[in-house]
Image (spheres, rainbow, N blue to C red):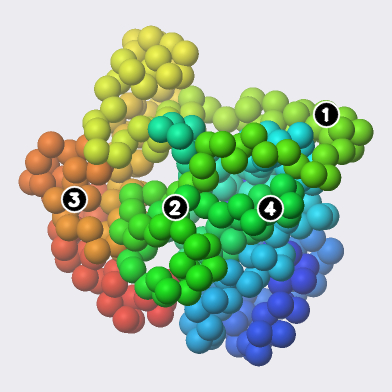
Amino acid sequence: MTDLVPIPLDLFDHLGRAGLDVGAILRRAKLPRSRFSVPKPQGTTAEFFALWRAVEEESDDPGLGLRIGVAVLPDQDNVVSLAAMHSATLGEGLRKLARYKRLMCPERISIDVEDGEARLRFEWLLADGAPPRLVTDIIFAGITNLAQRGTKTSLRPNRLEFIRRRGNEAMLRRHFRCALRFDAPRDLLVFDEAALALPMIDRNAQLLAVLLPGLEQAVEKDGRARTLADDLRMALSDSICGDRPAVAKVARSLGMSARTMQRRLAELGTTYQEVLDQVRRRSARELLANTDLGIGEVAFLLGFEEVNSFTRAFQGWERTTPARWRARATAPSARSLS
């Protein structure tokens, strides 16, 4: 998987109009301005996150991400956004967005329809930790804006869930006019299932006929480049949320027996337990650094039967206890360097 994230060409114009010193932001993020003087600037996930953390530190405007999300997304020069906007229905458009987004950057969007809701989950596949607050605000505001512009309605989400501590609640409620949940195990944007049937007013079947063959070829190429360990990592990330995923069940979701999966993982030089530990370690770091969930709650969400089992596993990963790691990660000096 290529670790490259596109940087919108007009981003620095938006930041400048917001009264921010772009040079100071780049210096704080330790990024040279020359990186962004090419026609299609890109950065790694770590660089992209560093850029937005620097913006957060330079800005005292909590609503900046919401305004950028509305102004920049959907990007009409972006073929993935075009495919979504010109679909027949909102549901079809969101599914195209989910299918093709990973062709642009290592971010995965998954859609789960259950109990009358359509739940969009957002996951940065190559990130070490949760995305900066501004990035999540931009994505949530941008996709809500895409849905409203595409359907020509005032559609609002049912609920937003954030992997972060409570903050700026009144501002978020004013913008989205929906329920909010903080200290959540996942970033979710939730619409009513019935909204998926809303027609996209500017549907253009001829444009889609031009765009989709190239996008599908790229998806096929991306699929050939992925390994079983990559697919297992995503399956585990989807399934662990208060439950320890059974080997046989996960293998079935990947279309094979547990024995075949274990054999193929061994050929790649890894094991089911090693991949599970990778997913749990990453999720543990996200939840400890960005939420106020108790250690026991984090252990439960990661599928550990006992807090002691989680603590032992975490000490093996980080050489310290979850409580001590959290204290370091949330100290002011650590936040300013992250």
The residue that mark 2 highlights is 159
Measure how far apart labels 2 and 1 are at the Cα level.
34 Å
Q: Amino acid at mark 2?
A: Arg
Q: Position of residue 237 (x, y in %)?
A: 39, 38
Residue placed at 27% from the left, 59% from the top? 288
How many numbered discs? 4
Q: Earlier in the sequence, mark 1 or mark 4?
A: 4
Q: Nearer the viewer, residue 275 or 80?
A: 80
Above or below, 16 relative to 249: below
Residue 232, percent across and down? 43, 28
Q: Quadrant of the N terminus?
A: top right
Residue corresponding to mark 1: 213
For mark 3, what is the residue? 297
Between discs 2 and 4, the one toward the N terminus? 4
Measure how far apart labels 2 and 3 are at the Cα level: 22 Å
Circles 1 and 4: CB atoms closer than 8 Å: no
Marks 2 and 1, the one that precedes in the sequence: 2
Q: Residues within 10 Å of mark 4 (few under 14, many from 20)?
A: few
Label 1 to label 4: alpha-carbon separation: 30 Å
Residue at the image position 10 percent from the left and 46 percent from the top: 307
In the visual, does 320 lie left or right of 87?
A: left
Q: Nearer the viewer, mark 2 or mark 4?
A: 4
* Amino acid type of the residue tagged 3 in the rendering: Glu
Residue 71 figure quarter: bottom right
- The spot of residue 135 in percent (x, y) is 54, 64
Residue 63 appears in the figure: yes
Q: Position of residue 277 (x, y in %)?
A: 29, 39
Q: Which mark is residue 153?
A: 4
Q: Mark 4 belongs to which amino acid? A: Thr
Q: Earlier in the sequence, mark 3 or mark 1?
A: 1
Categorize mark 3 by other alpha carbons within 10 Å: few (<14), some (14-19), many (20+).
some
Q: Nearer the viewer, mark 1 or mark 4?
A: 4
